[in-house]
Image: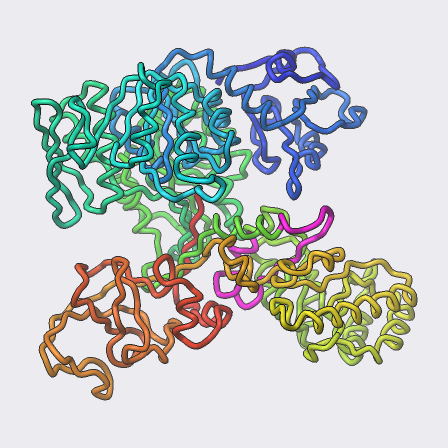
């Protein structure tokens, strides 16, 4: 890794030094204070934001040993006596300038990839196709943003001889900045579609912006069937740029272009015939879906430009597999938690995966199963020294290392380790190893076939699963944070098993992203979170007298909602010698008439709190019954008026300061003037808007999926299911799916009142939904046993499914059985 002098930063980034000690060197760029692993060689770039401000973590980083900082806010440098601090106008722009400066030091070919869909797939596939011939540096995962691109480019070093970076944009003006960082020689355009169009006036404006990546390129590779892109390529600015064009339409293909004259689709594969000039080619693609075929053709066009012949391309293209671009958290054998990243292994994505492992470990000891890192472009001694430091800094307890290269470098590994030459040799000894109550990361280069290890480690008791997209959840969290005033705290509801999605995993995500409070319904939910390593303050909304001792033991904070509950909790406190007053939350009934103190109770409530020195009010709150309904705004305003009135009395009579909160998800969206000191986020985190106008701003979090167990052909008059509830009116093809009302599939959907989705098509439910399975009509669907079946997800939305069931999304999510496996996905 290249070293740079801190002394050069001011000139590179147009900044000024607040302090500049001699002899400071850096090789790592750091933007997230949670991910420091080499503090002495790290430069922290403090990016300011409305909800996330890197400047707030400079003190923490200084304590960890970081001594080099770029800031965009003035600091009291006396607190950091031996640190180098450079002040710039924009930290993100400074990051881009540093990466651009670094990029200019290299003369190797650089491929830049842009488009609406398929950027990451094409990048990874080109890497697979060319890995035998080049030492490649590429964007980790989908690092294609204003921050992700410069961090990717920073990974270039003198041992690389090819770079592949993807560039994504969301707003006008962004591509110009990314072009200066990537400076591509070859530009590749993937599919142009509707993605990211919301901030542009038209597809034409979006394409024009993306064309900015080609400003100084020598070659452009693209499909010409998109009319907007085809016309943009005719601009005089690109007249002298060589164009490698492919098309399904002869009329859209120039004479030297690649015309796809025929497609022959089979089961999971496609043979394409291509004509280029007078030559004809046949390529055998291991995919049949349209998006994968299009991405394959883009890769083929690129390889043809690089002078690979038909035989070489056909041989290499068989190595391509569908990309699993997201980390998966799976239930493992013997109570293990399994993080599956078994399709790639490089230094930067390893750091991401280790952070993900730690955030989902739930207090368990951690194991990393790693393969050789191939084609890293770093000397082996340096590479495995870096890996060792990374594993130690993330407090990994054990390493299982697979591959001849990492085994040869075992002297550089300083933690408890087991070494194997191959995946097969590890699996041979698998039964001799004890995997119990571990959090395990499985991360390997594709050639090592680590999916076989995942198969051995995964609990395979039930095919039906609930997939939870943690990126989508984080998107929703940040959306609601963007609606809060500066300083407003955030409490998130994780009761009822995290609304069915898994409280421990969701809470780990929330803790990692620094929410202020969690709330559960009952004490035992809070205890499970504490045992899983969750240290955030946790409010218990229904504290039962039998749970008071447990609440105190695990430092949970009870909701006090009546004088009788207060008296009982005071009695429990009397049995314990506490060093300080215990935190409680007071709930006020302002008109909903569920739990809560009535206005007539407030006088005695305050008297008891003043008299009892063992209590301190953490918060006072109320619940709005109709915050999402504009027709009831008058009632909501009355609730808020009552709440403010009661709070004034409590403050005056107790003299205590505390947080106030009234807004739930609907309230956050509709009553920004009533945020007080804290708000409570519930169903909105899980992708459901209480106020329909904001639904398009949220991301769907959950997908309820199963698989086809069996396919049968039945005749006219044949019966399906219990009680002769369905009789086939004609010959049919049916599928049996292992999901029933014991899993959460509503029995009310029986007899055609509901449907599932297979291959994006509706499969009507036949007969009655059984306890453990259901039968569906697949007469018009081309599918096979083992194919995925969607109960709700990308084709049937949660809201649509809830409507089918005549209920609400809350009930749907919380009624999904615990026997249904939860699988957590994160890019």
Magenta stretch, residue numbers: 481-508
In the image, residue 225 sits, relative to residue 107, either above or below, namely below
Q: Is residue 289 left or right of residue 616?
A: left
The residue at the point 91 percent across, 65 percent down is 652
Q: Tell me if 447 is positioned left or right of 385 in this view.
A: left
Q: Answer above or below: position of 715 versus 118.
A: below
In the rendered image, is residue 556 in sight?
yes
Is residue 461 among the parts visible in the rendering?
A: no
555 on left or right of 149: right
Image label count: 0
Name the foreground residue: 761 vs 791.
761
Residue 620 at x, y = what percent? 77, 65
Quick check: is 504 in the magenta stretch?
A: yes
Residue at position x 25%, y 25% from top? 302
Instruction: Name the colour scheme.
Output: rainbow
Q: Position of residue 17 (x, y in %)?
A: 72, 17
Q: Residue at x 11, y 39 (%)?
A: 262
> In which quadrant of the rendered view does residue 62 lie?
top right
Specify whether 526 is left or right of 320.
Answer: right
* Residue 778 higher or lower than 391, as above or below: below
- Does the stretch in magenta take in 568? no
Whole-percent x, y for residue 83 in the image: 71, 21
- The image position of residue 141, as x and y in percent, is 41, 36
57 w.r.t. 381: above or below: below
């Amino acid at each position: 890794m290249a070293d740079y002098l801190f002394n050069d930063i001011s000139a590179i980034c147009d900044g000024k030094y607040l302090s500049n000690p001699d002899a400071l060197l850096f090789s790592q760029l750091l933007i997230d204070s949670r991910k420091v692993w080499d503090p002495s060689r790290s430069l922290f770039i403090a990016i300011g934001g409305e909800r996330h401000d890197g400047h707030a973590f400079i003190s923490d980083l200084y304590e960890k040993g970081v001594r080099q900082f770029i800031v965009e806010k003035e600091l009291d440098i006396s607190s950091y006596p031996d640190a180098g601090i450079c002040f710039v106008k924009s930290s993100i722009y400074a990051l881009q300038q540093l990466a651009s400066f670094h990029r200019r030091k290299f003369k190797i070919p650089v491929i830049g990839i842009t488009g609406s869909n398929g950027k990451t797939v094409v990048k990874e596939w080109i890497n697979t196709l060319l890995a035998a011939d080049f030492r490649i540096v590429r964007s980790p995962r989908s690092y294609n943003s204003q921050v992700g691109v410069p961090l990717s480019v920073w990974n270039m070093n003198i041992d690389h001889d090819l770079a592949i970076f993807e560039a994504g944009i969301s707003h006008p003006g962004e591509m110009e900045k990314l072009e200066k960082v990537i400076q591509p020689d070859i530009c590749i355009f993937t599919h142009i579609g509707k993605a990211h169009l919301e901030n542009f006036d038209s597809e034409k404006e979006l394409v024009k912006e993306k064309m900015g990546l080609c400003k100084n390129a020598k070659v452009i590779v693209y499909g010409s069937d998109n009319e907007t892109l085809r016309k943009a390529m005719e601009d005089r600015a690109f007249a002298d740029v060589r164009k490698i064009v492919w098309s399904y339409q002869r009329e859209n293909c120039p004479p030297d272009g690649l015309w796809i004259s025929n497609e022959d689709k089979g089961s999971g594969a496609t043979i394409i015939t291509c004509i280029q000039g007078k030559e004809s080619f046949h390529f055998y693609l291991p995919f049949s879906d349209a998006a994968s075929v299009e991405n394959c053709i883009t890769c083929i066009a690129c390889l043809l430009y690089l002078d690979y012949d038909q035989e070489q391309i056909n041989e290499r293209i068989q190595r391509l597999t569908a990309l699993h671009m997201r980390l998966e958290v799976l239930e493992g054998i013997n109570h293990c938690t399994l993080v599956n990243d078994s399709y790639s292994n490089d230094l930067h994505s390893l750091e991401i995966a280790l952070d993900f492992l730690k955030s989902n470990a739930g207090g368990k000891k951690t194991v990393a199963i790693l393969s050789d890192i191939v084609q890293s472009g770093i000397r082996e001694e340096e590479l495995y020294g870096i890996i060792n430091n990374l594993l130690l800094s993330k407090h990994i307890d054990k390493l299982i290392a697979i591959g001849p290269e990492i085994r040869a470098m075992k002297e550089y590994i300083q933690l408890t380790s087991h070494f194997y030459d191959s995946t097969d040799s590890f699996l041979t000894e698998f039964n001799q190893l004890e995997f119990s109550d571990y959090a395990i990361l499985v991360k390997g280069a594709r050639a090592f076939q680590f999916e076989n290890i995942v198969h051995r480690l995964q609990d395979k008791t039930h095919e039906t699963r609930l997939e939870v997209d943690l990126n989508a959840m984080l998107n929703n969290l940040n959306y609601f944070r963007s609606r809060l005033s500066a300083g407003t705290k955030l409490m998130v509801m994780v009761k009822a098993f995290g609304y069915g999605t898994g409280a421990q995993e969701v809470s780990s995500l929330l803790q990692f992203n620094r929410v202020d409070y969690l709330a559960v319904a009952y004490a035992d939910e809070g205890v499970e979170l504490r045992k899983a390593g969750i240290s955030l303050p946790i409010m218990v909304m229904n504290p039962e007298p039998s749970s008071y001792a447990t609440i105190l033991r695990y430092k949970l904070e009870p909701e006090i909602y009546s004088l009788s509950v207060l008296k009982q909790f005071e009695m429990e406190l009397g049995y314990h010698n506490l060093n300080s007053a215990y935190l409680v939350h007071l709930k006020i009934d302002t008109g909903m008439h569920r739990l809560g103190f009535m206005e007539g109770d407030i006088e005695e409530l305050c008297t008891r709190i003043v008299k009892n020195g063992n209590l301190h009010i953490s918060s006072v709150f109320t619940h709005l019954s109709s915050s999402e309904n504009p027709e009831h705004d008058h009632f909501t305003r009355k609730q808020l008026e009552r709440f403010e009135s009661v709070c004034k009395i409590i403050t005056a009579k107790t003299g205590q300061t505390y947080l106030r909160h009234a807004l739930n998800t609907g309230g956050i969206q509709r009553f920004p003037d009533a945020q007080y000191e804290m708000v409570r986020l519930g169903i909105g985190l899980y992708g459901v808007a209480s106020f329909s106008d904001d639904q398009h701003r949220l991301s769907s979090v959950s997908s309820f999926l199963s698989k086809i167990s069996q396919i049968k052909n039945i005749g006219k008059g044949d019966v399906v299911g219990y009680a002769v509830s369905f009789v086939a009116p004609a010959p049919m093809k049916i599928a049996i799916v292992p999901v029933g009302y014991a899993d959460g599939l509503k029995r009310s959907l029986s007899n055609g009142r509901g449907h599932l989705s297979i291959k994006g098509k509706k499969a009507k439910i036949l007969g009655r939904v059984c306890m453990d399975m259901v039968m569906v009509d697949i007469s018009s669907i081309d599918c096979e046993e083992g194919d995925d079946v969607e109960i709700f997800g990308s084709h049937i939305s949660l809201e649509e499914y809830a409507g089918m069931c005549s209920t609400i999304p809350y009930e749907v999510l919380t009624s999904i059985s615990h026997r249904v496996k939860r699988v957590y996905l994160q890019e």
